[in-house]
Image (tube, rainbow, N blue to C red):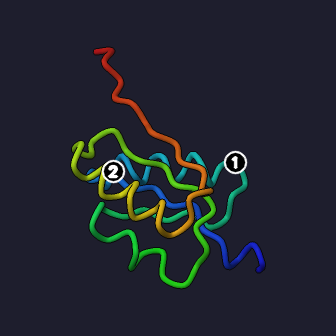
Amino acid sequence: MTDGDRMILVVSRTASAGRNLKELIEFMDTPRVGTAAPGEWRSKLGKHKLEALFVGPDLSAAEIDELLGDIGQLDPNIPIVMMEKDDAS
């Protein structure tokens, strides 16, 4: 499988937060990074192999449970990064 077949996916309900994280990951020279809402991640991933998953801080507990269960069925060894809300104002 080539690097072009792999994807890092950012799942976030807030499109702007997802795009910001996507751009940060791409800045670290990772060419294929996608963003998706919780219910759209499968279609966004398509036929690519999921290399890592970033979970936005705006997902509900139920959305996180469902997403992590689905990812575990896909491949239990996929690295997952859980993002936290920044409480500083």
Q: Are marks 1 and 2 in contact (CB under 8 Å)?
A: no
Residue 44 position by quadrant:
bottom left
Pointer 2: what residue?
16
Depth order, front residue of 73/26: 73
Most extreme residue toward the bottom is: 47
Label 1 Cα neighbours within 10 Å, binned few <14 / some 14-19 / many ≥20: few
Which residue appears at 42% of the width and 54% of the height? Answer: 19
Whether 8 is drawn above or below 61: the answer is: below
Q: Quadrant of the N terminus?
A: bottom right
Q: Amino acid at mark 2?
A: Ser
Q: Quadrant of the C terminus?
A: top left
- Residue 41 rendering spot, x and y as whole percentages: 38, 69
- Residue 81 rendering spot, x and y as whole percentages: 52, 42
Cα–Cα gap, marks 1 and 2: 19 Å
Label 2 Cα neighbours within 10 Å, binned few <14 / some 14-19 / many ≥20: few
Which residue appears at 27% of the width and 67% of the height? Answer: 39
Secondary element type, mark 1: loop
Nearer the N terminus, badge 1 or badge 2? 2
- How many labels sit on residues? 2
- Residue 52 rendering spot, x and y as whole percentages: 59, 56
User: Which mark is on residue 59?
Assistant: none
Question: Residue 30 vs residue 47: left or right?
Answer: right
Most extreme residue toward the top is: 88
- Residue 25 rendering spot, x and y as whole percentages: 60, 49
Secondary element type, mark 2: helix
Depth order, front residue of 65/82: 65
Question: Residue 67 vs residue 53: left or right?
Answer: left
Pointer 1: what residue?
28
Which residue appears at 78% of the width and 78% of the height? Answer: 2
Whether 28 is drawn above or below 75: the answer is: above
Depth order, front residue of 66/83: 66
Q: Amino acid at mark 1?
A: Met
